[in-house]
């Protein structure tokens, strides 16, 4: 009797949870359509060759020190003025009294870069820099052009390099080395190739953590768990059914995301398909296990929100979903690599864009499986059904 | 109809036996030494106001809570180690349960039926019993409060339970929905030997559905017995409900001096008076009104109710 009954219970539970999810249109939107929209939006934003426009302030108040102990001289400003008068195009400013110049560097390969130069007093320039309206502030001292910008801001660094190259070339007429830029647009080297596996990983984590944790806390708060365990239902079947449905939904979501990315951006899977399934499945198990552990006691959805956020937010920031985690300090990298989301994103990227084989993802898959098994067991041990 | 079994404290094989049970939560002593037995086929109401300890007691019988002290036996077995077997013979309805919003009535019953290994036939039968044929394809979220409670009752009845435990099955329902639940339970009593335990603070519900009533308050049993035993124990007292047109005729001191056993609903205006010898005491009461120039707006003589008994023991009303 029991042997016959158990599979039936599991099937019924899976069927009930699946219906519960697919009958909510919002779930379809947020679970499936939203990640695709993010991929499309970011993919298009980062893959289109766009013209770059950067604003630069020229300090025009000689009495004001630009930095402590330094003074500018009125005569020295003429270096920049002379260059702007010669190569720049005078354009109308927001304030007719303030002259503005435009210099455009044409580049068929990388796109146009346009600099808008605007004279300003130091205070106003600093305010605009703080607001993010400016990339670089320029002035001159004793015939030397000075660039002021935040060295930690990579965009400001990029602007500085382009500006200094522009000024050096125009001032010194220095001979240029023959060089060409060959843009890498092959599949696997673009930002979208980096982004799509990251989005899949994030989607898996979010779906498991919010879908499972929140769902269980809600069922506990509504006393549905209490009612269900007052029957001969096998408790582990209840949790396994929730996990099964969640993994199936994630598979559908990720498959659709991949299909859209394949059609729109020509994304390909360069590595092992079985390896991809292994890392996908074990990561799902890991996040489902963590979700069950996180939601094993509380019946309060507010507390549940906090707990889930405490787990997902650090990983969202650190695990390199949108940008490489190698920008973080070296001493953090070892820790970041051990996070489940990092293992998943790294695993997916290695298969998608590096062509990794099955054996190369075996270790992270095994670790993810162990994480899932551990948290599932502990969560089940302390699970509060009443 | 099956004859109503008589509860016997010496029943050697009670379906439920509660032995001197205590349960506390932090600073609240919810249950303080409760004893009773419930026989096969017996229907028992645990009647008491909110906070009396009814739900805690019920949850201990359901195996959800463990007593701090004392024992509970279901068919002679403790919960520990026998959960699987006991879950199969018990049907229960919690005070408030939300089922999965977007499952239909049929799917919800089929899911719970599946836990007992029951098929579609039993589900269809239950839907007929609880009168939700018209809602068979309706999502649970779209059911009214009464319909949801009937669904909860249907789930409790799925496994044809030997023991049915209902925690305030009609609280919050309108009178019509309440009567529909009563009708289902009365039919069940006619056609089965199920032992029924229900908690309620509606005396009418206890009177309608149960042969035995256990009145609890502050975690203790105040009184128990059949309705007749409880009501007649006070040797045929009658109650007079009355309402006056004005409250200025007699001072509280005068009312107290008159010696009537009055329970005021609105002091000096309306209340109920308990009379042992109505033939002599009613004329005395009317004479008192006349002497104090008080005129009656309403006067009604009735039997004592459970609410009167509860009030006489605690000074409070059941539904307070």
Image (cartoon, rainbow, N blue to C red):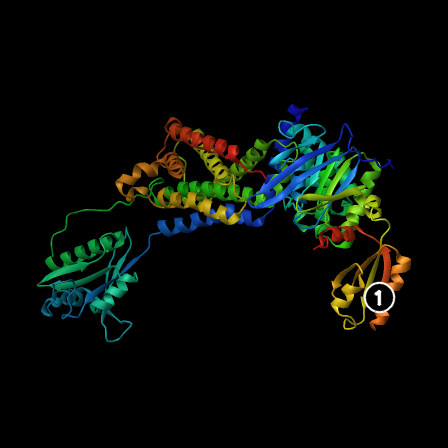
* B176 lies left or right of B286: left
Q: Position of residue B5 (x, y in %)?
A: 83, 35
Q: Position of residue B177 (x, y in %)?
A: 76, 51
Nearest to the observer: residue B215 or residue A3: B215
Q: Is residue B185 visible?
A: yes
Nearest to the observer: residue A253 or residue B301: B301
What residue is pinned by disc 1? B298
**Image quadrant where residue B43 sits:** top right
- Image quadrant occupied by the N terminus of chain A: top right
Where A92 sits versus B197, above or below?
below
Q: Position of residue A85 (x, y in %)?
A: 17, 68
Where A386 sits versus B86, above or below?
below
Nearest to the observer: residue B252 or residue B226: B252
| Residue found at the very far right of the displayed protein | B279
Q: Position of residue B263 (x, y in %)?
A: 76, 59
Where A124 sits versus B102, above or below?
below
Q: Residues within 10 Å of mark 1 (few under 14, many from 20)?
A: few
Where A337 sits versus A313, above or below?
above
Q: Is residue A258 visible?
A: no
Marker count (numbered)? 1
* B18 lies left or right of A83: right
Nearest to the observer: residue B62 or residue A121: B62
| Residue found at the very far bottom of the displayed protein | A97
**Image quadrant where residue A275 sits:** top left
Disc 1 chain ID: B
* A349 lies left or right of B202: left
């Amino acid at each position: 009797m029991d042997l016959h009954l158990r599979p039936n219970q599991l099937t019924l539970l899976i069927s009930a949870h699946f219906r519960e999810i697919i009958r909510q249109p919002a779930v379809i939107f947020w679970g499936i359509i939203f990640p695709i929209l993010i991929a499309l939006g970011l993919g298009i934003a980062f893959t289109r060759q766009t013209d770059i426009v950067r604003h630069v302030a020229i300090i025009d108040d000689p009495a004001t020190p630009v930095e402590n102990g330094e003074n500018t001289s009125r005569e020295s400003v003429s270096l920049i003025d002379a260059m702007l008068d010669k190569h720049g195009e005078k354009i109308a400013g927001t304030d007719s009294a303030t002259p503005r110049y435009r210099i455009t560097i044409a580049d068929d390969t990388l796109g146009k870069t346009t600099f808008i130069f605007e004279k300003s007093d130091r205070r106003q320039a600093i305010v605009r820099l703080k607001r993010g309206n400016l990339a670089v502030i320029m002035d001159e001292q004793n015939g030397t052009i000075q660039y002021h910008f935040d060295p930690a801001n990579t965009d400001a660094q990029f602007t500085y390099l382009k500006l200094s190259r522009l000024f050096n070339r125009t001032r010194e007429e220095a001979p240029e080395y023959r060089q060409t830029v060959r843009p890498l647009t092959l599949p696997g080297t673009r930002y979208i190739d980096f982004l799509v596996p990251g989005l899949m990983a994030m989607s898996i984590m979010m779906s498991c953590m919010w879908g499972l944790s929140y769902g269980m806390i809600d069922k506990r708060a509504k006393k549905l768990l209490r009612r269900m365990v007052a029957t001969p239902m096998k408790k582990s079947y209840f949790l396994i059914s929730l996990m099964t449905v969640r993994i199936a939904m994630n598979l559908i979501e990720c498959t659709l995301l991949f299909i859209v990315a394949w059609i729109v951006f020509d994304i390909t899977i360069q590595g092992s398909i079985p390896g991809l399934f292994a890392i996908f499945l074990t990561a799902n198990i890991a996040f489902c296990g963590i979700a069950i552990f996180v939601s094993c006691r509380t019946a309060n959805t507010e507390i549940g929100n906090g707990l889930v956020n405490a787990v997902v937010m650090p990983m969202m920031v650190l695990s390199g979903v949108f940008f490489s985690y190698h920008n973080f300090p070296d001493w953090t990298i070892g820790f970041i690599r051990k996070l489940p989301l990092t293992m998943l994103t790294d695993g997916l990227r290695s298969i998608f864009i590096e062509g990794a084989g099955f054996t190369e993802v075996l270790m992270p898959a095994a670790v993810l499986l162990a994480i899932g098994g551990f948290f599932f067991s502990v969560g089940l041990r302390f699970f509060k059904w009443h | 109809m099956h004859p109503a079994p008589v509860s016997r404290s010496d029943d050697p094989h009670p379906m439920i036996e509660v032995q001197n049970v205590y349960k506390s939560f932090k600073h609240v002593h919810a249950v303080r030494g409760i004893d009773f037995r419930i026989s096969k086929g017996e229907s028992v109401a645990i009647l008491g106001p909110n906070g009396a300890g009814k739900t805690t007691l019920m949850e201990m019988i359901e195996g959800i809570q463990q007593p701090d002290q004392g024992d509970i036996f279901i068919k002679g077995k403790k919960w520990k180690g026998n959960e699987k077997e006991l879950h199969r013979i018990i049907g229960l309805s919690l005070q408030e349960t939300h089922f999965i919003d977007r499952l239909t009535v049929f799917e919800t019953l089929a899911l719970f039926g599946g836990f007992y290994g029951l098929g579609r036939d039993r589900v269809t039968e239950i839907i007929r019993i609880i009168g939700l044929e018209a809602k068979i394809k309706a999502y649970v979220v779209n059911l009214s409060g009464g319909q949801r409670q009937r669904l909860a009752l249907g789930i409790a009845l799925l496994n044809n339970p030997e023991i049915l435990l209902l925690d305030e099955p009609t609280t919050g329902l309108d009178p019509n929905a309440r009567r529909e639940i009563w009708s289902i339970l009365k039919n069940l009593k006619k056609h089965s030997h199920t032992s029924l335990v229900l908690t309620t603070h509606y005396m009418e519900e206890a009177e309608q559905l149960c042969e035995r009533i256990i009145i609890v308050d502050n975690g203790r049993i105040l009184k128990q017995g059949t309705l007749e035993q409880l009501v007649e124990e006070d040797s045929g007292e009658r109650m007079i409900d009355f309402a006056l047109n004005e409250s200025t005729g007699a001072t509280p001191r005068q009312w107290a001096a008159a010696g009537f056993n009055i329970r005021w609903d609105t002091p000096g205006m309306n209340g109920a008076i308990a009379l042992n010898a109505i033939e002599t005491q009613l004329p005395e009461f009317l004479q008192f009104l006349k002497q104090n120039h008080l005129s009656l707006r309403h006067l009604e003589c009735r039997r004592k109710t459970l609410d009167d008994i509860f009030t006489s023991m605690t000074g409070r009303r059941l539904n307070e």
